[in-house]
Image (cartoon, rainbow, N blue to C red):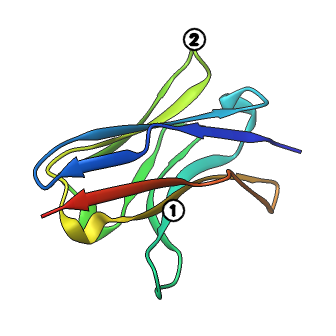
Amino acid sequence: QVQLVESGGGLVQAGGSLRLSCAPSRSIFSINAMGWYRQAPGKQRELVASITSGGSTNYADSVKGRFTISRHNAKNTVYLQMNSLKPEDTAVYYCNAVDYGNDYWGQGTQVTVSS
């Protein structure tokens, strides 16, 4: 079992930045992979970025060059740094952990980008 606690969403103008945080209940190195998904109204949930326990990262094409997923070992936290935000980035963002085939989700945090 993995519990995930998210923080950092909010309202920002287009071109601005936000940083999301996700703290799991276990060591991030004991979890196969962690990532961020988002779901906009009327749309399916989609992968934004992910990072494996070995440090490999993966990004959706729509956020490459703007978003960065990283982890802080001492704080046992995974971050999503979002720069150059666009109105189309508006969504509820969910932290995800994949551990031996099981998916775990955070409660979600709203990100709203105004034009």
Q: Which residue is denoted by mark 2 in the rendering?
A: 74
Identify whether 87 is placed above or below 80. below
Mark 2 or 1: in front is 1
Q: In the rendered structure, find residue 107 and report the number of the disc placed on it.
A: none
Question: Marks 2 and 1, how far apart in space?
Answer: 24 Å
Q: Position of residue 19 (x, y in %)?
A: 36, 36
Q: Is residue 19 left or right of residue 6?
A: left
Q: Position of residue 14 (x, y in %)?
A: 13, 56
Badge 2 crowding class, 10 Å Cα cut-off, few under 14, some 14 to 19, many 20 or more, is: few
Q: Is residue 115 left or right of residue 107?
A: left
The amino acid type, in three-letter code, at marker 2 is Ala
The amino acid type, in three-letter code, at marker 1 is Tyr
Quadrant of image for the C terminus:
bottom left
Element under label 1? strand
Instruction: Confirm whether residue 58 shows in the render.
Output: yes
Residue at the image position 19 percent from the left and 54 percent from the top? 85
Front residue of 49 and 43: 43
Q: Position of residue 12 (x, y in %)?
A: 23, 48
Q: In the rendered structure, find residue 37 and report the number of the disc placed on it.
A: 1
Identify whether 88 is placed above or below 13. below
